[in-house]
Image: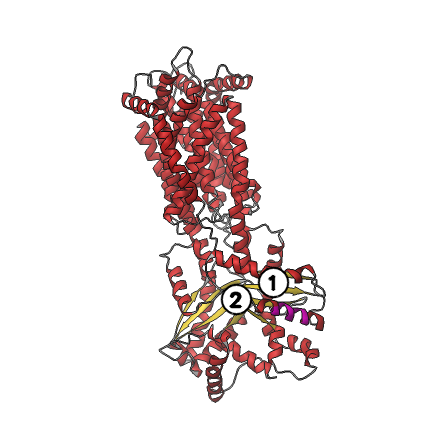
Amino acid sequence: MNRRDAPFLQETFRRIIRHRWWILSLYALLFPVAVVLAMRVPTDNSIDRLIVRDDPDYLAQEAFRKLFPEGEHVVLLAEAADPFAPGVVQKVEEIEARLAGLPGVRTFSAPALFRRADAVAGARQDFRRFATGTELLRKQGLVGDDFLGIAVEIGGGSAGERSKNLAAIDRALAPIESAPAPLRALRKIGGPYVDAYLEAETRSSSTRYFPLFGLFIVGINLALYRSVRTLAAFLITLAASVAFTMAFARLAGYASTIVSSLVPLTVLITCTAALVYIQSRYAENPEGNDPETHQIFTLANKFLATSASIFAAAIGFAALAVSKIRPIREMGLWVAAGLLLTWVAVFTLFPALQRILRTPILPRRTAAGKLLLRLLEALPRFSYRWRWALLAGSLILMGAGAVALTGAGRTIAPMRLQTDALDYIDPDLPLSRDTRRFEKAIGGLSVVQIWVSSPAGRILDAGVLRGLEELSVKLESDARIGSVTGPTTMLRWMRYLAGGADRLDGDDAAWEGHAATMEGLMLQEPELRSFVDVAGLSDARLTLIYRAEEFQGVEPLKRLVRTMWDSVAATDPALSGCRMRLVGEGMLQAKIAQHMVPTLTESFFLTAVIIFLAFLLVFRSGAARIMAMIPSLFAILVMFLVMRLTGIPLNVATILIASTVLGASENDQIHFFYHFQERRSSGTTEQALAHALRIAGRAIVFATFINAGGFLALALSRLPPMRQFGIVTSSAFVLSMLASFTALPAALWIFSRESPAGKAGR
């Protein structure tokens, strides 16, 4: 493109520059509103947030909750060398007394059960025999070798209400934690604490990432352009882009989740890269040219390539909308909207700021700049000489990466999927260590609910209750199942408290008596009403705790429960007329695992197709555009190989690597090919490569440093998935740049069948 090309674009940018003060005033009015909206984006890392609202398992879970509304649960572990000593029991009772006054908080413990046994004077000394005389207490996590557990239920609600309840519990227990004797320690575990930690880390991420990225922008800007005025234009444009992106989330009803910190970071990086491409072209104004005329030329010259790269990235991220993992779906649409808003700011606010601040041109190249230019000038002939080795080596590594991701038959398994929320926090944290230890003690922490529906009003019939008890006993006989708690569990408790066995058996007459007792307990025991729907007496639930690592996904667990249900129903006519379903958070977590691979493959495929079509539309050559995607594909597949070799799993963050790298790195290839074709129509392949590397090569290097440096800031995260994502994504951008300067020119040489002299080669 020369200075007389694209008259419409040049006239458009001439008007933008002419009305620069009006544009700046408009942004100044909208910016405070955007900041206020951005600050009101809520934070929510609950498991429910991970599933889209129209998912069948999510809908079943919501229907289940209407019948069995309950709060969230945490567990307090009172650790002691001898957990049955009188002093320890007294301390546990003190803990329960401190929590009793908190609104919406209920506790359940072995000492509380012991008190309900109507013990005679001095019976406290028999607590050891009481606590160790049944497996019920151990299976419920209320008794361990060196702890007594206190189950705490807190009222359900929003993430803010959960945080408020946890803070109230922490305040009430602060004196105990500061002086725990005779306890060794008082430990707090449970899903709410994990969610609260993730939310706190998500909120605080900006306080660490953005200042670091800001310093990075300041450093690279001053190093490249040596101008405070240019730096000011960059920072103002970046601030506006991020503020409008976050404001969009508030207007769209999105919430900040564990992957949401990627949104402003991605916008910052994409916007910075676009500004670098524009400013680098503008700063090299030939001597004697009018700055405003050259600015208009630069904007028109970089408009097509910059717009194509931003739109391709935006549509690529929008392809994540196919995901059934809700935060990833929202993150994709959120980034796409942010990139479109960024595109507007890049071609309106930034040109206005360039003219108002009179950003200077570069008077001369630095020594480093001259060295980089010499290296870029040597690349065309270097890539021709080693073209076959460079391309073959790249293809071999790409094939190895594909195998590392998808596996190879029975020899190599696909990459491991990670869905447990506990895997998203540092394993060295006390919260993680204590939870894993408790998980081993009770035989697992993964939970599903067995939802049983009977004919109208028949859930407390003797035959149904007997069938539920038989199902519980059968399931608990499997070593992979920790415990099953249901309506008949309360009957077992009552028998044990009365001094009998903790098992329910007997003939039909005995079960008629059990059913009558159950009806009486329904009026007295709130805990029992949480297992039976008292309104219709047609639904009940059994809480099943299991070791998730013993099952390859939830489907084997489903088959196990279904097999045992069918076995019991075959001999119990009352149960055969009932319906059984598996619901609960465990089901939703398993659903996330099922959706991860489709999220990766579908979104990546859509992103690749969309970017290819964008290339085809802009550059009109399908074969050459396939080669243009070599650097991105090389970087992505090689990073999967690195992840496999280093043991980094696929999770809710790292699953985004393919789409993120493909969407962001194609920016470099678009600019490269745009300038390659500028010269290719009237010159040789060598001349076109030299022209593209001279115009876009330096900007590709700078943009890569920005992309890699920006995402590398995530390495400071205390959340393993984000830390892993930052490291591997940064590495992928560097690999993409290397492929852009080696494998891509090699492929172009082979495709053109020319030699550096311009003659046809073999």
Asked whether residue 391 is in view, the answer is no
Residue 516 among those drawn in magenta: no
Q: Residue furthest top?
A: 288
Up/down of 241 relative to 433, above or below: above
6 lies left or right of 280: left
Residue of label 1: 172
Q: Give how far apart the Cα atoms at labels 1 and 2 are.
A: 12 Å
Image: 166 above or below 43: below
Q: Looking at the image, what colour scheme do you see?
A: secondary structure
Q: Which of 384 and 107 is in front in this view?
A: 107
Residue 692: which numbered mark, if any? Answer: none
Q: Does the magenta-highlighted stretch encompass residue 95?
A: yes
Residue 704 image position (x, y, % from top left): 49, 30
Mark before the other along the chain sequence, 1 or 2: 2
Identify the amino acid type marked 1.
Ala
Secondary element type, mark 2: loop
Q: Is residue 42 visible?
A: yes
In the picture, measured across the screen, residue 10 lies left or right of residue 161, that is: left
Name the residue type under label 2: Pro
Q: Is mark 1 on a helix, strand or loop?
A: helix
Give the x, y percent position of residue 171.
Answer: 60, 60
Which percent across, then down, holds residue 116? 59, 79
Q: Name the residue under label 2.
A: 103
Q: Main secondary structure of the magenta part?
A: helix
Q: What stretch is highlighted in magenta?
A: 90-97
Residue projecting furthest to the left:
8
Q: List the single residue furthest toward the bottom.
A: 509
Q: Residues within 10 Å of mark 2 (few under 14, many from 20)?
A: few
- The quarter of the picture where residue 11 lies is top left
Q: Position of residue 641 (x, y in %)?
A: 52, 40
Foreground of the two, 199 or 645: 199
Looking at the rendered image, the quarter that the C terminus falls into is: top left
